[in-house]
Image: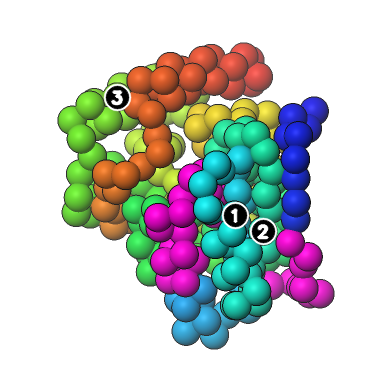
Amino acid sequence: MVKASRETRQPREFGSEKYISVVIPAFNEEKRIELTIKLVHDYFASRGDTFEIVVVNDGSSDGTEFLIRRLAAELGSITLVSYSPNQGKGYAVKRGVLLTKGRFVLLSDADLSTPIEETGKLLAVCKDEVDVAFGSRALRDSKVEIDQSVVRRVMGRVFNLMVRALALPGVHDSQCGFKCLNGKAARALFAAQTIDGFAFDVELLLRAKKDGYRIQEVPIRWLDNASSTVRPLKDAYEMFLDLIRVRRLFK
C-alpha cells in the first residue's frame, strides 16, 4: 500500500538501457546532496559509461528537493522521485530501483561514506557472474579510514551478530549501503521487497540467496560521516523488529 500523501516525479529522458543506474536515497540531505550528486555524475561521465542517477527524496523537510531539481535541470542525467511523509530507507531504495533501466544498479548512500570510486570493485565482481555484490567494512582487506562512534560501532556489531545468527550466516556486513546488482536481478528482488526501514538490506540478501542469485561480499574503503541521519537507539530497535519480520518471511 502506498503510504505517501504527496508525490512528484521529475520527467524521465532515457529511452534505452543504460550501462549503470545509481540509486541514492535522501532524507534531509541539503548540506551534502549537491556535492554528492556532482561527484557521482562526474565520476561516471569520466568513465564514459552511459548512466542515470535516480535520487529519491524520502519526505525531506529541508531544501533537499529544491537542490536535486536544480541539479537535474543543470546536468540532465538525474531522475528525481519525491514524496511526503518520510517512509524509510528501504521504501526509498525500492522506489528508486524500480525506475531504473541500467544493466547494473548501484546503491549508494547520500553521504558517500564509501567513495564513489569504489564502484569499480563491485562492478568487476558483478561482471563475473555475480548477481549481488555488496560492500563490506568487516573483511580483512576492507579499509575503514574514519571509524564510527563507539556507540554506533558496538550497536552495529551486535546487529551483525544477530543477522548472522538469524538470517545470513557467513555474511560479515549486511548493512553497508554500497551495493551493486545485476539490473534484472535488482528489479526482480526489489519488486518483492517488503521491509521499508534500514533492515531492508537483510531481506534483500536473504531473498537473493533463497531465489538462487549469487551474492558476494567485497572489501571496500569506508569513511564514517559524523552527520549521518541514522538515529542509533530508535533505528536499532526498529531494525531488530524488522530482522524478526524478515526471519518470519523466510521460515
Mark 2 and mark 1 residues within 8 Å of each other at the beta carbon: yes
- The three-letter amino acid code for the residue at tag 1 is Glu
Asked if 74 appears above or below 173 in the picture, the reply is below
Location of residue 108 in the rendering, given as x and y in whole percent from the top left corner:
48, 54
> Taking 244 as reference, is 211 above or below it?
below
Viewed as shown, does residue 190 lie left or right of 144? right
Q: Position of residue 190 (x, y in %)?
A: 68, 42
Residue shown at the point (64%, 21%) measured from the top left: 250
Q: Are marks 2 and 3 in contact (CB under 8 Å)?
A: no
Point out the frontmost of discs 2 and 3: 2
Crowd tier of the residue under label 2, counting other residues whose Cα lies within 10 Å: few below 14, some 14–19, many 20 or above: many
Q: Which mark is residue 80?
A: 2
For label 1, the SS is helix
Which residue is disc 1 drawn over?
A: 65
Amino acid on which disc 2 is placed: Leu
Badge 3 marks a residue whose secondary structure is: helix
Structural distance between the alpha carbons of marks 1 and 3:
31 Å
Question: Closer to the N terminus: mark 2 or mark 3?
Answer: 2
- The vertical placement of 230 against 146, above or below, is above
Question: Which numbered disc covers residue 218?
Answer: none
Q: Foreground residue, 239 or 182?
A: 239
Q: Residues within 10 Å of mark 3 (few under 14, many from 20)?
A: some
Name the residue tied to disc 3: 155
